[in-house]
Image (cartoon, grey):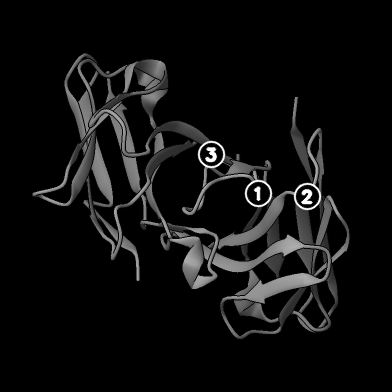
Amino acid sequence: SQTIHQWPATLVQPVGSPLSLECTVEGTSNPNLYWYRQAAGRGLQLLFYSIGIDQISSEVPQNLSASRPQDRQFILSSKKLLLSDSGFYLCAWSDNRSNLLAGELFFGEGSRLTVL
Amino acid sequence: AQSVTQLGSHVSVSEGALVLLRCNYSSSVPPYLFWYVQYPNQGLQLLLKYTSAATLVKGINGFEAEFKKSETSFHLTKPSAHMSDAAEYFCAVSGPWTTGRRALTFGSGTRLQVQP
């Protein structure tokens, strides 16, 4: 069966410090991968999605970046965190064999980032 | 472009009462629609999905939703609420891959409270 792991679960960082959140998927190959952010009371905002290694689309201009160095690894990074980067970050994957419409997403447990 | 609107950011019901969470969608193509549930500090879990088959979709934990094209709605219902249903619920719509955007668009969420 497929599993998705996301870490760290909780992170407290000062403004201006770097960030690295990691996500790995097991039990499937060539998944579509996603990073969403959930700010308090604002639902889920898609940050990045990737349909393959080094194929990453950015949804919202910001000081965050994403990389996919391996097929089942997705990393969210920042060189200098802002207060507004605080939130709950969710990694997700979907089966790339879905038809013409985007398919069901499977989510990790999330990483709560607090920037002070 | 696809979008979903969830009416009511907070819904409170008594234990044993009907649960009704509202979702209206906008889509340029026949959509796939999803309902997810999120418990505190956890990722999202799929409740049910509509993929153009039966318009009445049954999901886990006794939830169901009905796709109504004429009303562009996909409301979530459960006949009798349990305390364990207290959580945040998200409606989501898929986008056609032909646009290059292979991701779900989520509503802003509805927090369900169940009173004893």
Nearer the camera: disc 3 or disc 1 = 1
What's the amino acid at mark 3?
Pro
Residue A39 appears in the rendering? no
Q: What element carries label 1?
A: loop
Q: Name the residue under label 2.
A: A30
Residue at (68, 43) in percent of width and height: A108
Q: Which chain carries label 3?
A: B
Q: What residue type is labelled 2?
A: Asn
Q: Residue B106 carries which label?
A: none
Instruction: Residue at 26%, 28% (x, y): give it.
Output: B54
Residue A48 falls in image quadrant: bottom right
Question: Within 10 angstroms of label 3, few (less than 14), some, or many (20 or more) residues?
Answer: few
Q: In this view, does B82 lie to the left or right of B40?
A: left
Tell me the chain of label 1.
A
Mark 2 in CB contact with mark 1 (< 8 angstroms): yes
| Residue bearing the label numbered 3 | B40
Q: What element carries label 3?
A: loop
Q: Are marks 3 and 1 on the same chain?
A: no
Residue at image location 42% in from the left, 63% down from the top? A42
In this view, the mark in front (2 or 3): 2
| Residue B96, visible in the rendered structure | yes
Measuring from the top left, give residue A13's x and y in whole percent: 79, 69
